[in-house]
Amino acid sequence: MTKLELATFLSIAALAIGALALHAQTPVAPQTPPEAQSQTHSAAQSPTAEQTQNPPGTSGANITIGATPAAVRQSGEDPAAVARGQEAYASAGCISCHGATAKGTDTATDLVRSPLVEDDTKGELIGPVLSQPHPKNSGTKPNLTDQQISDIAAWLRVQVYGAAMRDTYQYLNIVVGDPQKGEAFFNGAGKCNTCHSVTGDLAGIGSKYAPPQLQGLWISGGANARFGRGLGRGLLTANGGLLADTSPPEITPSTITITVTLEDGQKFTGVPVSYDDFHVAFRDMSGAYHSFDRRGEWPKVEVHNPLQPHWDLLKHLTDDEMHNVTAYLVTLK
Amino acid sequence: MKTRHIALALFIALIPLTILAQSAGVTESMLLNPPPDSWPTHHGDYSARRFSKLKVINDTNVQNLSLDWESRVTGGTPANTTPGRRGAGNVRVAGSPLLVNGMLYFTANDNAWAMDARTGRIMWHWYRESTGPEPVTANKGMGMYGDWIYFITRDNNLVCLDAATGAQRWIQPVADPKQYYFSTMAPIVIKNHVIIGTGGDSLDLSGFLQARDPETGEIQWTHYNTPREGEPGIETWPNEYAAAHGGGGAWVQGAYDPELNLYYYGTANPNPVYAPQSRAGADLYTSSIIAINPDTGKMAWYYQASPHDTHDWDAACDTVLIDGTINGKPRKLLAQASRNGFFFVLDRTNGKKVVAVPFVDTQNWTKGLDTRGQPIPDPAKEPSLGGSLAWPNAGSATNWPPPSFSPQTGLFYVGTGEGYAVFYLTDTDEHPEGYAGIESALGEGPGSIKALDYRTGKVVWRHDWPDGGSAIGLLSTAGNLLFCGNANNLVAFNARNGKILWHAGLLAGPNAPMTFMLDGRQHILVFAGDTAYNFVLNVSAPAKAKAAAKPH
């Protein structure tokens, strides 16, 4: 066999081997799609974080910043095991070097960022480490029962979960402003009192909402049900309900309405259902549904957004002004 | 026979393998100069312009654009019950398909398909369920080399499939999903490198870009986007530990200039995301635009779009290559409409700033530009206990859906939204972790398509959507057309003046449209949710008869 022939042979052989080496995964048959909505990674995620307010200076149930009660709840871990694990973590002395939330200190590693802890599912990785003499601390062996090891593993997993899952985060005390200055702004430069009254629509608002919610509500105007989301683009959900519902739409002070004028002079006012460059659909004040093509100038569509003053204010509102007004509104019990 | 003869023989034996593998599918010359009947890389070509020279469909006849076929795909069934996993579900083809030899190849998380571009017929479907807690679902798509297809799963596995059958050639782990790494980018094939990257900012990991061998999937090089001890840039972190946990993922595919042999991409935000106290400094090379040698993984230059980012404004948006003229001189440029609201144009030979101006109506986070021409962040707008009101919000002025640049109009097109948020610090620890704060995005304002003069960043025309809008994928063509989506509509604009010329209502919001020629017809193809829509011009009666006479 010449070198060339050998090369050809090997080439064919390699092809055959290559073909055999393909671990062909049979493509699966199309299946029924799941029902859940997909979402993009980068869509602004409005955190459904705990809106409850910690009293200043406390941190509830010994769980400090990091893993909140929501993290314990959502993590799927047994809350009793997590609580026991926290105690064992402290009593075994881990806490003195690795810190109260296991984030580490100058002398010990951050356990939350430890791949071993992150990869653990049921103590199978953390357990063997805790059963051995400590790798750094003079080889001391922590005197832990199997139950305690399992509990500490559960508590550590919650710490990881609580750091990573931002929908478990909890606001700290956000009331940092000066209520007197807030009151002055409310009645002065902010012109809030043009539309609002602290003895009318805002009476007792400080008891109705936790401060983070209150701050969000007052600056945005509280458009729609989603905590203010939708300022200027809440048209699709303005009416809620099914389109077969022909009862008159509910109009609140923040409801966006539109006026549609046809070429023949007919005029409608209502709550928009959809509005783009090609169609406008809405429910009029009696509840009847209308939709029109938009071609050229007609029909004319005017949008009335009662929250426009909020939007305009926000472009100039300083953080001090925002904090001061919030501090003022919090006092309206 | 001596050993070296065997080695030589084996070497020679492998050459035809490579040639065979390439001859029927994607070749290097196809990637460098894509023929009109192909779309062989995520953006159609390496420039990321998303501009097509095709003009069969143009501003005089686009009103005759009609549906040729539509085709719906169904995905595998995710049964992942990891606690807290959010939002993975229905199929949404968010990225861009490839088109090679009349076949479309595309992904939705954990799923891959091949579809006949002439008929919409699904040829094969591959599915593998990801594990891990990160719920991201906007997989950007595939890369192709020879007859092999590459994409990366949500849980960081690089998959290589046979384009003809969908059979799995190999699957290689890239990063640990339980450390909250995720992956979404479409691999980019450059010579014999499959360029991939990872994202993930939930738990202070270290983002990286990697080159893999197209035959074996082995690592050729890894480039971490944050420096280590002794490397330039480490002085912008308090210590190596902070840098090594400093984030800076690479979850959006970049662009490539073959003449300069540089690959360009935008890096993600630093970690902890909203808390500044453990990472004082600029935090290089997070939220940056980076040029890298694809053969070595060595960085050639950087430009930081958001120094010391505390608002989750990754610079992970497209880096668009423009061969333009500034002050009468031809220049090799790179443009990015960045999530922080700034439009950047850089000299892509060296990273020097040419333009850095806001393209949003309202931004309140900067105090001018530094000596490198980078925005200077206002520390007062960092997340705080009482909340800091900042524009734009973390959803950002724009995002990963690709913009477009038309050399014909000289305009850079971008979908943008106005929005603010209150940024709260929730972790005041000396060593905060994860996001360590809450972004309360309270309202999204007006949204528009803006056409920017690349030489100045000035808005030449804008179209404000009646009911808002934000980042959206775009396509411009030599037919003086700009295609994009708004709400559930696919819309065609006159690219020069922003006048709407055509639209079609779809069942969901569309991805970035693509275009190609097949059998003498120009196609506009778009995915909306789980359905592909293929549009062609309505042909006149004689042409139709001719088409019908042609054997299929």
Image: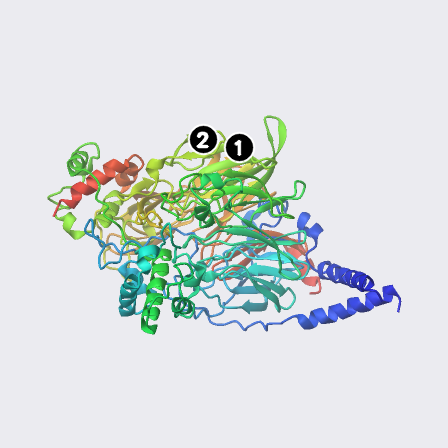
Q: Percent x, y for residue B470?
A: 42, 46
Q: Are marks 2 and 1 in contact (CB under 8 Å)?
A: yes
Q: Is residue B120 visible?
A: no
| Numbered disc 1: secondary structure | strand
Above or below, comparing residue A3 to residue B277 in the picture: below
Chain to which mark 1 belongs: B
Q: What's the residue at 22%, 57% (across, down)?
A: A60
- Inspect the image, locate mark 1, and give the three-letter code of the amino acid beneath it: Lys
- Inspect the image, locate mark 2, and give the three-letter code of the amino acid beneath it: Leu
| Residue under label 2 | B369
Name the quarter where the C terminus of chain B is drawn: bottom right
Query: Which label was assigned to residue B74?
Result: none
Chain to which mark 2 belongs: B
Farthest top residue in view? B327
Q: Is residue A26 left or right of residue B277?
A: right
Q: Residues within 10 Å of mark 1 (few under 14, many from 20)?
A: some
Q: Percent x, y for residue B135?
A: 43, 60
Q: Earlier in the sequence, mark 2 or mark 1?
A: 1
In the image, B142 versus B379, the foreground residue is B379
Spatial CA span between label 2 and label 1? 10 Å
Q: Residues within 10 Å of mark 2 (few under 14, many from 20)?
A: few
Residue A154 found in image quarter: bottom left
Query: Which label was assigned to residue B353?
Result: 1
Q: Percent x, y for residue A147?
A: 32, 73
Q: Is residue B23 left or right of residue A242?
A: right
Name the quarter where the N terminus of chain B is drawn: bottom right
In the image, B503 versus B205, the foreground residue is B205
Q: Percent x, y for residue B175?
A: 51, 59
Q: Is residue A69 visible?
A: yes
